[in-house]
Image: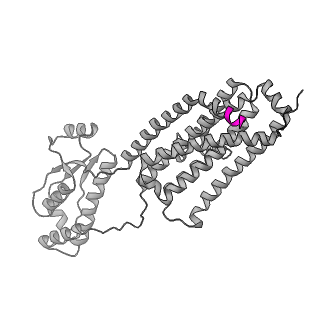
Amino acid sequence: MIVFKTFLKILNKNKLNVLLYTVILLVFGISNMQTSENSMNFSPSKPDIVIVNHDEEKGITKNLMEYIASQSNVVRIKYDGETINDALFYRDVNYVIDIPKHYREDFMNGKNPALEVKSTGDSQSAFEEMILSRYLKIANIYQKAIPDETELIRKVNEALSKTVETEMTSKLDTDISSKTAFYYNFASYSIMACLLFVVSLILNSFQKEKIRKRIAVSSTAYKKHNRILLLSCGCYALALWVFYAAISFVLVGSFMFSRYGALYLLNSFVLTICATTIAFFIGNLVTDKGAINGIVNVFALGSSFLCGVFVPMQWLPDFVLKIAHVIPTYYYVSTNETLKTLETMNFETLRPVIINLGIMLGFSALFIALTNLVTKRKRRIK
């Protein structure tokens, strides 16, 4: 009980550090979630185009212009080469269609006349290219079988008016799942930093020579002493995890009550256990407070950069990801990325998640064993 009370007393002195990392999580986590939401919202738009017609505006030529105009924003500008080129350069228009003289006549005679086009080469111009190609392909097919222009136009319009019905086969809300993954990925930095920094400093207080010698000559075995300290750290870690989990319920909402939300919570809980054992090891190994501060910053920030917390995994080079395999945070983030796109839950789809959780627990066991080894050696009074 004395050990636990001392732990709480030292923890109270470091509460500002916990508040600092929590503020960082809220600021960057919320901003990342808002960025994710904005980038995932799709709003259809029409390309800005110019149609230069040198032919008669009737028949198939008129129908082509009407169809293009219905799918695009037709911009009215002066029809000279310099003005059009300037409009393309400054992105005032995306696409220019030049219909040559006698286009209607040549088309109906099966000569397949070419249209001159200019474009900016961006996504909008590519979309306009698809619109134009669709009309021309359908019109050319019907022209070979239908000599009458009126009937040809009717068939073309009928074909173009047909749409394909789509059905959503996935019930996963990828938007909310992605926002949850953003939050929990960034939360790993705050969890790591809070636990490594605070727990290591608290344990460092027990490493002072006088205190260490008093503990060594006491009747308490070093393993029991470690268990008491580890349980004290566990209580702090549990409170920290509950606090960050509660924040996710506020930010994400009802999604956290689903099976997916439960897996995000479980993954973060296992990371919290792992981070606690790492902090316990560092606190018992390092006696200099300045060194602890440096180690914590290097480990918390380094693991976040290498494992896909600050930079998405898909953007990281392969050699960086290979290095990240030796860091527990890699398996934590990997699980979040898997959950983000997981549509069905069964043993096969959850196998990577189970493996990652097992690896993180394996890291925890390793650091507990290393801590016992270190403290056993330190109890030898010289």
Determine if residue 12 is in view.
yes
The image quadrant of residue 11 is top right
Please give the name of the residue rendered at 61% of the width and 47% of the height, measured from the top-left corner: 271
For the residue pair 243 and 32, the one nearer the viewer reads as: 243
351 displayed left or right of 315:
right
Outermost residue, right direction?
382
- Looking at the picture, does residue 82 appear above or below residue 115? above
Please give the name of the residue rendered at 48% of the width and 63% of the height, measured from the top-left corner: 343
Please give the name of the residue rendered at 29% of the width and 46% of the height, measured from the top-left corner: 119
Give the quarter of the figure containing the C terminus: top right
Magenta range: 1-6
Location of residue 249 in the rendering, given as x and y in whole percent from the top left corner? 45, 49
Location of residue 358 in the rendering, given as x and y in whole percent from the top left corner? 67, 55
For the residue pair 136 and 324, the one nearer the viewer reads as: 324
- Looking at the picture, does residue 6 appear above or below residue 84? above
Outermost residue, bottom direction?
145
371 displayed left or right of 76:
right
For the residue pair 114 and 206, the one nearer the viewer reads as: 206
